[in-house]
Amino acid sequence: MTVRITAKGFDALTELWQHSPAKVQEQLSSAMNESVAYAQYQVVSRTPLGSGDGGHLAASINSEVLINPAVSIGYVGTSKLYAEAVELGTKPHMPPIEPLVNWVEAVLSLEGDEAERVATLIALKINARGTTGKLMFKEGLEASEPYIQARFNEAMKLMINKLGGANA
């Protein structure tokens, strides 16, 4: 999913960039970093608890900001392969038992044969019905859009007021 920001006062920004590119870049970088951190928080807060391979899915969700003079890109994602299945859900299939046993132990605090029995029941249910997508990335990014738009608008106003006045 892509969030696109519509900048207000873009003509003024172009003018400011010519006079103070470092200060403009600083403001835009600040807005981008804060926006991506907020989006990451929104996604993580919607991610279901579980153990997963090597830890909770939520703990694996990270963010990165890439900024150069031509483009700024903010990324929120995970390297966990099962994240797509959690996000979108799955069709009926027989999942591997071991990750479910790990989940049952971590989340339900069951152990041994009881954990394996409950994991098997969960696997059979998934085999019969599939899983429902949690949509944590979609909904988290949608929830972030108003903040991101407001943060970039704030950065634009600040640049126009401070830098525009300094160059006038």
Image (cartoon, rainbow, N blue to C red):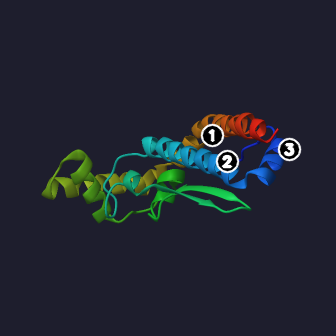
How packed is label 3: few (under 14 Cα within 10 Å), some, or many (20 or more)? few
**Can you tell which mark lies on residue 106?**
none
Residue 2 visible, this angle:
no
Residue under label 2: 3
Residue under label 3: 11
Q: CA distance from mark 3 to mark 1?
A: 20 Å
Q: Amino acid at mark 1?
A: Ile
- Circle 1 — which element? helix
Q: Amino acid at mark 3?
A: Asp
Question: Are the two marked residues, 2 and 1, in contact with CB atoms closer than 8 angstroms?
Answer: yes
Residue under label 1: 148
How packed is label 2: few (under 14 Cα within 10 Å), some, or many (20 or more)? few
- Whole-percent x and y of residue 39? 54, 44
- Whole-percent x and y of residue 92? 48, 57
Residue 59 visible, this angle:
yes
Rendered residue at 47%/43% (across/down): 41
Quarter location, residue 139: top right
Closest to the camera, between mark 3 and mark 1, is 3
Closest to the camera, between mark 2 and mark 1, is 1
Closest to the camera, between mark 2 and mark 3, is 3
Rendered residue at 76%/42% (across/down): 6
Q: Is residue 21 left or right of residue 62?
A: right
Please give the count of numbered marks on the rendered protein.
3
